[in-house]
Image (cartoon, coloured by chain):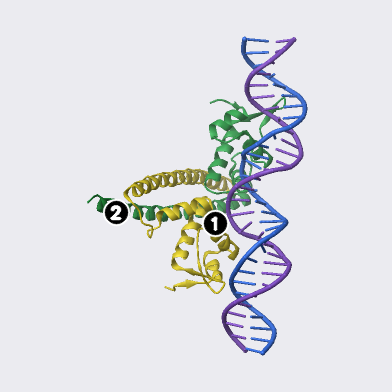
Chain colours: A green, B yellow, C purple, D blue
Amino acid sequence: MKQTYSIKELAREFAVTPRTLRFYEDQGLVSPGRRGTTRVYTDRDRTRLKLALRGRRLGLSVEECKEIIDMYDPARPRNPRQLLRLCEKIREHRAALLDKVRDIEATLNAMDEVERRCLEELLAAAA
Amino acid sequence: MKQTYSIKELAREFAVTPRTLRFYEDQGLVSPGRRGTTRVYTDRDRTRLKLALRGRRLGLSVEECKEIIDMYDPARPRNPRQLLRLCEKIREHRAALLDKVRDIEATLNAMDEVERRCLEELLAAAA
DNA sequence: TCTATAGTTGACGTGCACGTCAACTTTTGG
DNA sequence: CCAAAAGTTGACGTGCACGTCAACTATAGA
């Protein structure tokens, strides 16, 4: 459990370029500290990056990732009204993710069907 | 089961603009016929659109959607070598989709955790 | 101390996926 | 028959997510 990371380290770990990490900083997704002029990423930055990249892979925009991650940030203090809003948002996001799961399932089913026909044809060709 | 569709009809059905459908045609994703100069979409076009938009929602590029849809097209004749390639590709795509499912599951778990803490806090605030 | 390596800030470029006119033609309902 | 609605082809604009220099600075190891 290292506490800090260089930009190169995190870029390599997450298979992105330093440019991407600087871009995400511009967008307010992470705010690494500085040692002199050099960026120093904490575990919190690393976690936010991990979540952001996960969101990106699922097709979310950087802005959407930021909003969600900010909202879910456990360090953020909240009043009951905000907590209710958060619960609401969670339900929305969950629904959106379940929609995606349905898309994936539909695609997987279609792929199974194609594969089945594919194997059938191979069998017929082998005869 | 209508056989043909206007550009407006399909745009409305899939909640995109006609511009998008023309763009997809430029990219070779669909090739509707013409009645005079007006586009006439068939059920095949409609199916390809449905698959394409599903792919888009999952974060694929239009080009990727096209490749996959072309490859899976049942109307396409294939020799055994191509069939084997297709099976290979299906395995790849399936693996990619399962990766996405894992991302979604991880996100859902994180959301459950946030919701749990959220409800706890609400409970504490109510006391 | 000197050099190689890593890091920094601009600033401009790029590919993608459309949006947004404009100018025009075509089709359809009254 | 004629107006309104729908459709067409360019062509340029836009927002996003970085890529790609350039020019410079900081730092660490021999």
Whether A1 is drawn above or below B2: the answer is above
Helix, strand or loop status at disc 1: loop
Q: List x then y, in percent, for residue A4.
A: 60, 27
Helix, strand or loop status at disc 2: helix
Q: List x then y, in percent, for residue A79.
A: 64, 47
Q: Tell me if label 2 and label 1 are in contact, CB under 8 Å.
A: no
Whether A53 is drawn above or below B75: the answer is above
- The mark total stands at 2
Q: List x then y, in percent, for residue A54.
A: 53, 42
Tag 2, which chain? A
Tag 1, which chain? B
Left or right: residue B94 compared with residue D5: left
Identify which residue is drawn at 64% across, 42% down: A77
Q: Which mark is residue A70?
A: none
Specify the quadrant of the image occupied by residue C3: top right
Left or right: residue D5 compared with residue A113: right
Specify the quadrant of the image occupied by residue C28: bottom right
Q: In this figure, which residue is indicated by the disc labeled 2?
A: A121
Q: Which quarter of the figure is the N terminus of chain B placed in?
A: bottom left
Is any part of residue A18 visible from this angle? yes
Identify which residue is drawn at 31% across, 55% down: A117
Residues at discs 2 and 1 both on one chain: no
Query: What amino acid does circle 2 point to?
Result: Glu
Query: What amino acid does circle 1 point to?
Result: Gln
Q: Which mark is residue B27?
A: 1
Identify which residue is drawn at 39% across, 48% down: B90
Is any part of residue B117 visible from this angle? no
Residue toward you, A43 or B66: B66
Q: List x then y, in percent, for residue B24.
A: 54, 59
Residue toward you, C18 or B103: C18
- Cα separation between marks 2 and 1: 30 Å
**Crowding at mark 1 (Cα within 10 Å: few <14, some 14-19, many 20+):** few
